[in-house]
Each structure stands twice: as structure tokens, then as C-alpha cells.
Image (cartoon, rainbow, N blue to C red):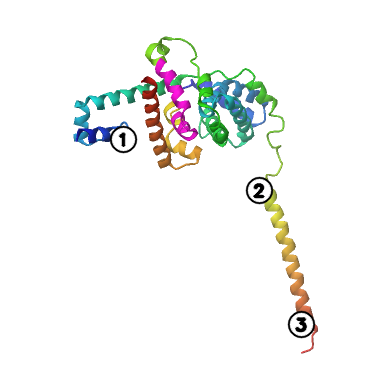
């Protein structure tokens, strides 16, 4: 949760950007580019991740006059990122899993990244990379980014039931892949 | 019976309501407990991934800003839907005028024709 002063500052930047102020938008890009890029990489892999992030940030600029502020700017931006990534899913599907695995690197050693957890995360990233694009999308959005089933369904253009079923299958497959890796 | 309950516990998503018999079985079955532990591990791992943020490539922001140029439609420029609606309205107007002209012609011809 961001402090109120940061939220207020961001609202002001958004308002200025909506009026066409590029400097204000540039500041918003600098603030959100890492999270947009992370989401894009998790959804489509490293080769397309930067392209998707770039395209999403440009789409956001175009759509900014229509941003009403119902959701936070970052939530709105992430929806655009998912949408952009989803339209590229066919291209993403062609990329081999190992490439995704290579770039999902740990950000550095720290107590919580140590030992078993670091190993689990490494194996988990490798397993996520081996999921189909559709399964990967629901797992990343639900289990990593914390979206609701309704949000996932809306953004991916599927029903909530499909989202739930796909998530269930994706988790089972993840579990199987982790066990396969451990044995 | 046990393997059926094991399968049931495996199929049900975490947090789903289970029948008392399935809950009691899960408490005493090592296989179910191991499965539950694996699920918890998966959950923890996924949560941890949520905290990890990758650094965007250094060129990303500059690349975005350089492409903003003509990306946003200029203020006052009519949107596509509005333009289409205007074209449709003009077409309808021309059509109505043509129909009126034809009807007038027919009426005049009838009036000129001797009974």
C-alpha cells in the first residue's frame, strides 16, 4: 500500500499526463516499468517481455484520456499489460521454456531467498515456464499477482468457470512438474 | 476406501469444504498429509514469486517515450464511430431526397395522365 502523499502525487501525474504532459507520463513510466516488465516476462517470456512491456506502456498513453480512476493506475496498467501479452500469446507459445527459465533470475541473495525457498523458487520458475501460455497466464495472475477469478476471466476473455478449471489444472501440472524435478 | 478419500482430497482445491469423513482421513493419512505439505510449499513459492520484481531493461523508458509521438489521437479529431455515423447520416439524407424526387415524379406523371 502506497502512502497517501505518494498516491496523491501519482494522481496528479496521471491528471497531467491525461492532458498530454509527456514529462508526467515519463515519470509514471519510470515508476511502473519494472512491475510492468516483470508481469510481461512472466506471461510471455524474456524474448517478448520487453516488447510487450513497451507496447503496453504505449497503449496506456493512448488510452489515458479514457482512464477514469475507478481502479488504481498500476492496476489499470497491469490490465493493459495482460491484454497486450494475451494478444501475443500465439507468438509466446513458440518460445521454448528454457529461455523463460534463464531470465527469471533471482534478484539477489537475502535471508528470505536463501536455502530451501530459493531452491523451490528456482524449480517453480522452471515449472511455470513449462506450462501452456493459457495455464501460465492464470497461475501468474491468480497465484503470483493475486487477481480475482473475475478479473482474470474479464482480461483473458474467458468465463470464470474456465478460469477456475484452468487454474486447477495448472496447479496440478505445476505440482507434477515439481515432483518430476525432485525425483 | 482410503485411496478413494486420498483421491478426493487431491482433487478438491485447497480451502474447499470437505466431508467430515474426508477431513478425518486427511488428518490420519500420511499420503494426504504429504500432499498437503507439497501444496503448502507450492503456495509459499508462488507467494514469494509475487514479491520479486525484475528490473526493466535500461532502454525501456526511453524507447517508450520516443514512440509516444503521434500515438495519441489529436484533440478535436473526430473518432471513427462518429465519422461513420456522420457518413451514414449523409447517405440517409441523400437517399431520402432521391426517394422524395421519385415519388414527386410519379405523382406528377399520374396527374398529367388523362383519366
Dot 1, crowdedness within 10 Å: few (<14), some or many (≥20)? Answer: few
Label 3 to label 1, Cα distance in Å? Answer: 82 Å
- Residue to which mark 1 is pinned: B11
Residue drawn at point x = 64 percent, y = 19 percent: B59
Q: Is residue A148 left or right of residue A68?
A: left
Q: Is residue B37 visible?
A: yes
Dot 2, crowdedness within 10 Å: few (<14), some or many (≥20)? Answer: few
Residue B24 falls in image quadrant: top left
Q: Is residue A23 left or right of residue A36?
A: right
Choose between A164 and A181: the one closer to the eye: A181
Residue B2 falls in image quadrant: top left
Which numbered disc flags the more N-terminal residue, 3 or 1? Answer: 1
The residues colored magenta run A119-140
Q: Tell me the element at label 3.
A: helix
Chain letter of the residue beneath label 3 in the structure image: B
Image position of B94 with respect to A145: above or below: below
Q: Quadrant of the N terminus of chain B?
A: top left
Judge if badges 3 and 2 mark residues of a common chain: yes
- Residue to which mark 2 is pinned: B81
The image position of residue B20, as x and y in percent, is 19, 35
Mark seen at residue B110: 3
Chain letter of the residue beneath label 2 in the structure image: B
Image position of B22 with respect to A125: above or below: below
Amino acid at each position: 500500500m502506497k502512502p497517501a502523499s505518494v498516491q496523491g502525487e501519482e494522481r496528479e501525474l496521471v491528471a497531467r499526463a491525461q492532458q498530454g504532459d509527456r514529462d508526467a507520463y515519463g515519470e509514471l513510466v519510470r515508476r511502473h516499468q519494472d512491475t510492468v516488465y516483470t508481469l510481461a516476462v512472466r506471461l510471455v517470456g524474456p524474448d517478448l517481455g520487453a516488447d510487450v512491456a513497451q507496447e503496453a506502456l504505449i497503449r496506456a498513453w493512448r488510452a489515458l484520456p479514457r482512464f477514469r480512476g475507478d481502479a488504481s493506475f498500476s492496476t489499470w496498467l497491469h490490465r493493459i499489460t495482460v491484454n497486450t501479452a494475451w494478444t501475443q500469446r500465439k507468438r509466446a507459445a513458440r518460445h521454448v521454456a528454457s529461455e523463460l527459465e534463464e531470465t527469471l533470475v533471482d534478484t539477489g541473495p537475502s535471508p528470505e531467498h536463501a536455502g530451501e525457498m530459493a531452491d523451490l523458487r528456482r524449480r517453480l520458475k522452471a515449472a511455470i515456464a513449462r506450462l501452456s501460455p493459457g495455464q501460465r497466464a492464470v497461475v501468474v495472475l491468480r497465484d503470483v499477482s493475486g487477481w480475482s477469478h473475475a478479473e482474470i476471466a474479464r482480461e483473458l476473455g474467458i468465463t470464470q468457470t474456465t478460469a477456475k478449471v484452468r487454474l486447477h489444472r495448472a496447479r496440478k501440472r505445476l505440482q507434477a512438474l515439481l515432483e518430476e524435478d525432485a525425483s | 476406501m482410503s485411496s478413494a478419500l486420498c483421491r478426493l482430497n487431491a482433487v478438491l482445491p485447497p480451502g474447499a469444504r470437505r466431508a467430515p469423513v474426508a477431513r478425518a482421513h486427511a488428518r490420519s493419512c500420511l499420503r494426504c498429509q504429504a500432499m498437503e505439505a507439497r501444496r503448502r510449499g507450492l503456495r509459499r513459492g508462488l507467494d514469494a514469486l509475487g514479491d520479486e520484481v525484475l528490473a526493466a531493461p535500461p532502454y525501456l523508458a526511453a524507447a517508450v517515450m520516443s514512440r509516444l509521438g503521434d500515438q495519441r489521437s489529436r484533440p478535436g479529431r473526430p473518432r471513427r464511430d462518429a465519422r461513420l455515423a456522420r457518413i451514414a447520416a449523409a447517405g440517409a439524407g441523400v437517399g431520402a431526397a432521391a426517394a422524395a424526387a421519385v415519388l414527386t415524379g410519379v405523382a406528377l406523371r399520374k396527374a398529367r395522365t388523362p383519366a
